[in-house]
Amino acid sequence: MPRHALADPTTPFAERIRLGWRYPLGGAAIWTIGAITLFESIAFLPITGLKLLVLALGWVALYTYSFECLRHTADGYADPPEAAVNGGDGTSVALILIQLTGNAVAVLAPILFGFPGLAVSLLFALVLPVITMSLAFDGVGAALNPLTWFEAIRRLGGSYAMLFAMVLASSLLQAAAQYALKDHGPTFFGTLGYYLVANYLTVYNFHLMGALIHHKHEALGYQPAAIDIAAAAEPDDDQALLAHVDLIARDDVPGATDILTERLREGLAPASMHTRYRELLRAQGRLPELLVHGQIWIAALVTAGETRRALGVVQDCIGVDATFLPDDTLTCGPLADTAAHGGMTRLALHLAEGYARTWPRDMGAPHYGLLAARMHERLGQHDDAAALARQLLAGHPDHPLRIDVEAFLTSVDAARPVSR
């Protein structure tokens, strides 16, 4: 698979403008520009109707390739694409129609409406780049929505003004080339020179549009493909660190543990790293640290919504210390509920009973006391369930759950076998 040079999105857009003039001269771009220009020279053959057909086909080929340059640059690639690989999709057709409309407005509006028409032409010239850019990263629907244009311009900020200035300057330069080469130069070579300049400037402008998308991709909510490809091609840093830790652990388990300790202190880490850390602690018999890590990881997992995985860590910690309990109500409570709903009756009983015992004055204590009583009942421990329910009634006589506790106690008493 060929490697592609990647552009740096943090490069200032002004710098991309300065360096961008070389883009149409590199890779496949210069050959594409030259081939289209030579194709357009066929228009000089004295064949009726040939000129219009050749120029139309050349114009379509140029804009299709230029649009591919826009996409390629927006995706973070520094070099021009080899070909217009997306040329057959609907956006290319929309691009041609939009560019035709833009050129028609630019030429006809001043002729038909004078000064107001010139203002319309300038306004359309202002939004035409953002329409083209929206077509690349949001599709046809967004490209035709005026609200999208102005929102994108707002997000692009002053960089869009720089882009518009360059597009306007390119238009003036193209007009100057037409005057000097096509209209007042040698008929064949002058016109060919004009086509070459016009084609070069078109690719350059589309490259700048793509460069602006790449530079502002975070503000636009666009994810350049090169970022994903680079991430997939390069080894994950944490995976590489784990491999290094495994290597160190062969001869120096405490040293390997220290490496992981430093990494875990940095913040969010994958589960594989926590698991390996616990294995190393267990291998050294560092059980107090194992329990401390368990508290920290359990809390992080509950915060992240990974209560099932957190319950697994709780069970592991209980295997080290049978009295282990998460050290916060916001952690212990949700885990007790999850265990109860997941059919993990004994674990739910341990957590719920521990909650009610550890935080008896907490507002959630009656709820988890009742949950523990229900788990006793589920295990067939009716006497324990009834005793716990009576403790709840005595300890929380005015709690809103009193009615539920009384109903539970009645059902437990009714279910208990009658002693003879």
Image (cartoon, rainbow, N blue to C red):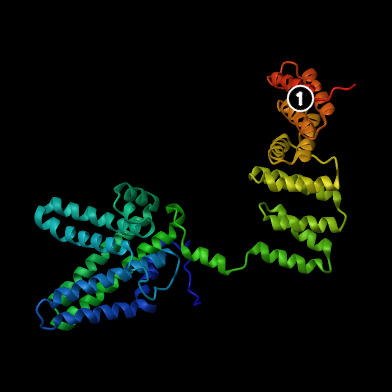
Residue at screen point 72% across, 64% down: 242
The picture places residue 4, in percent across and down from the top left corner, at: 48, 74
Q: Nearer the viewer, residue 247 or 382?
A: 382
Does 106 appear above or below 83? Answer: above
Specify the farthest residue to the front: 420
Residue at screen point 81% across, 30% down: 357
Does 376 appear above or below 303? Answer: above
Q: Residues within 10 Å of mark 1 (few under 14, many from 20)?
A: few
Question: Disc 1 marks which residue?
Answer: 361
- Where residue 298 sits, quadrant-wise, is top right
The picture places residue 122, in percent across and down from the top left corner, at: 21, 55
The picture places residue 257, in percent across and down from the top left corner, at: 79, 59
Q: Nearer the viewer, residue 76 or 272?
A: 272
- The reply to whether residue 186 is in sight is no
- The reply to whether residue 129 is in sight is yes
Residue at screen point 81% across, 50% down: 290
Amino acid marked by disc 1: Arg
- Where residue 14 sits, quadrant-wise, is bottom left
